[in-house]
Amino acid sequence: MALKGTLKDFGIGDIFQLIAQQKKTGVLHLKSKDEEVEVFFVEGDIVRGASPRANPNELLGNTLIRAGLMAPEAVETALARQRITMQRLGDLLVEAGQLSQEHLREMTLLQTTEILYRLFTWGAGTYAFEPREIAPDQCAVEPLRAEAILMEGFRMVDEWPMVKKRITGPTLTFERVMALPPETPVVEKPPADDFDFNLGESPAPKEKVTTIGHHERTVYQLAERGVPVSRLVELSRLGEFETCKALFNLLEMGILKRAELSRRQAVLGPRDTVSVGFFADARTWAGGILSSALLAAIAVLAGVGAGRWAVNLTGRDNPFELEGEPVNEHAAERLLMPAQLDRLKSALEIYALERGEYPESLSRLLEANLAAPADLRYPWHDPYVYRRTESGFQILPPLE
């Protein structure tokens, strides 16, 4: 009997439980409108979770870079070797002595669990189980009991709404208010002057135990003004939910507080932390519109052309000339686009936080003083393509 159908008929929990109880070995294929996930089982235990259409930022190499464990150059070298040897990237990095086995296990486990827990947020989709043998090189992590994944997944579903009331977006930033309490639990006893209790006219107040766990201590050390939630998730290596839950707990205890940034800082994005070994984000360049002279310099560095440059400040479409001839500036456009898109996405998030919804058009950002006219246009030319969707928004370079 084939195990396939829709998630409206059987939920993720039902499917996982059935495979675990029958100790099946094979691959569970899950598809939603925007995502595809494969879960590998060996005798009912989960040994890998993968997303064939994963965002490049979620691939192991980029994850290691953003977590501060690897330099981009080292990952590039390993990827070039991988294309020749066909070995797994993590194994190559460990063999070269550039990554510890412990960190590899930690990051592959985090990758797998983040994919699995995201399944619990799916509202619809299809599933199909393919019974087959799983080769050892397809096992990314030590076997995980499906029951443990289910318990953790359902806990996250229950607690996320509460957490999101305080951690309202990925661009929030925090600052420390007080030092952490000692690692041993602190028991807060009822006050000695509780007259109602001493007279026997009220029940005894419960002793309150205050303790700070490993997750809270990890996030506390990373949290500072200018480091957004999205960056804390990457640096803490705890996963999105656990990082946000730790932030929630620290806010509730009054140990952290939300750091207010100016509107312009919010639009440009918080400054990255240099101390953890990451390059400054492109958004920390200059605020506002980049000057034509700066664009020219960037284009030169990007290798747009060669020879003698003359910057054109006459207002014509192409700000560059080479020996009197216009130069193709597409390389410079591609270099500038990520920073410009980051500013626009941050402005859209701020707009949604302030008004409860994303704008109907990018021109609304101008009215809200969250962007300048040139911010809405792909460098030098046409406006970006923008549309509001049910789940958020889409923003793309202009169609050629």
Image: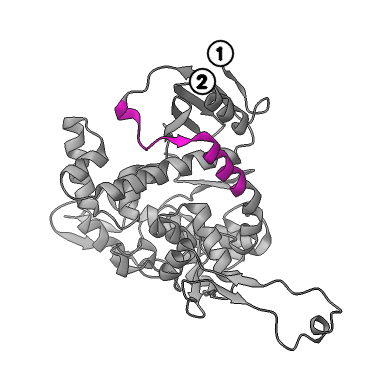
Give the residue furthest to the bottom.
193
Q: Quadrant of residue 92?
A: top left
Q: Circle 2 — which element?
A: strand
Distance (Cα) linking label 1 and label 2? 7 Å
Q: Circle 1 — which element?
A: loop
Q: Nearer the viewer, residue 231 or 280?
A: 231
Badge 2: residue crowd in 10 Å (few <14, some 14–19, many ≥20) = many
Q: Are marks 1 and 2 in contact (CB under 8 Å)?
A: yes
Q: Quadrant of residue 280?
A: bottom left
Q: Nearer the viewer, residue 8 or 366?
A: 8
Q: Quadrant of residue 81?
A: top left
Check the image and report above or below for 390 versus 21. below
**Quadrant where the N terminus is found in the figure:** top right
Name which residue type carries label 2.
Phe
State the image coordinates of residue 80 (x, y, percent, origin top left): 18, 39
Q: Which residue is mark 2?
A: 129
Q: How is the image coloured?
A: one colour
Magenta residues, dominant SS class: helix
* Residue range highlighted in magenta: 136-156
Q: Which residue is mark 1?
A: 2
